[in-house]
Amino acid sequence: MSESQNLEWKALWRDDHLKWGCGFANAEGGTLVIGRDDTGKPVGLPEVRLLLEELPNKLRDLLGIMA
């Protein structure tokens, strides 16, 4: 599997990646995978529990998207 129009891999989370969520929401949908490098290799995430708590709230508050 490789990145495509509906699949994007990011090694680390940055709030500017919210644009991908917005783009997917305005298109045919898609999947943003956090914790994989550009080749798709898993690289892990520091503080993943905190991200799992914060990310749905950011998507809701900033983009009006329920995740």
Image (spheres, rainbow, N blue to C red):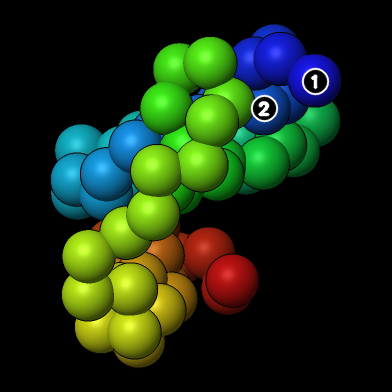
Q: Is residue 26 visible?
A: no
According to the picture, the residue beneath numbered tag 1 turns out to be 1
Q: CA distance from mark 1 to mark 2?
A: 9 Å
Judge by depth and name the residue closer to the eye, 44 or 19: 44
Q: Residue 43 at x, y = what percent?
A: 40, 43
In the picture, residue 31 is in which quadrant?
top right
Percent x, y for residue 35? 42, 47
Instruction: Specify few, some or many for label 2: CA neighbours under 10 Å numbering under 14, 14-19, or 20 or more.
Output: some
Is 50 placed left or right of 38 in the picture? left
* Residue at image mark 2: 7
Q: Which amino acid type corresponds to the residue marked 1 in the rendered image?
A: Met
- Horizontal side of residue 25 vs 56, given as left or right: right
Looking at the rendered image, the quarter that the N terminus falls into is top right
Figure disc tally: 2
Q: Position of residue 28 (x, y in %)?
A: 80, 30
Image point (19%, 49%), residue name: 15
For the C terminus, the image quarter is bottom right
- Judged left or right of residue 16, residue 67 is right
The answer to which quarter of the image holds residue 58 is bottom left
Residue 20 in the image: above or below residue 59 = above
Q: In this orientation, does residue 51 appear?
A: yes
Front-most of 48 and 27?
Answer: 48
Q: Are marks 1 and 2 in contact (CB under 8 Å)?
A: yes
**Circle nearer the viewer, 1 or 2:** 1
**SS for callout 2:** strand
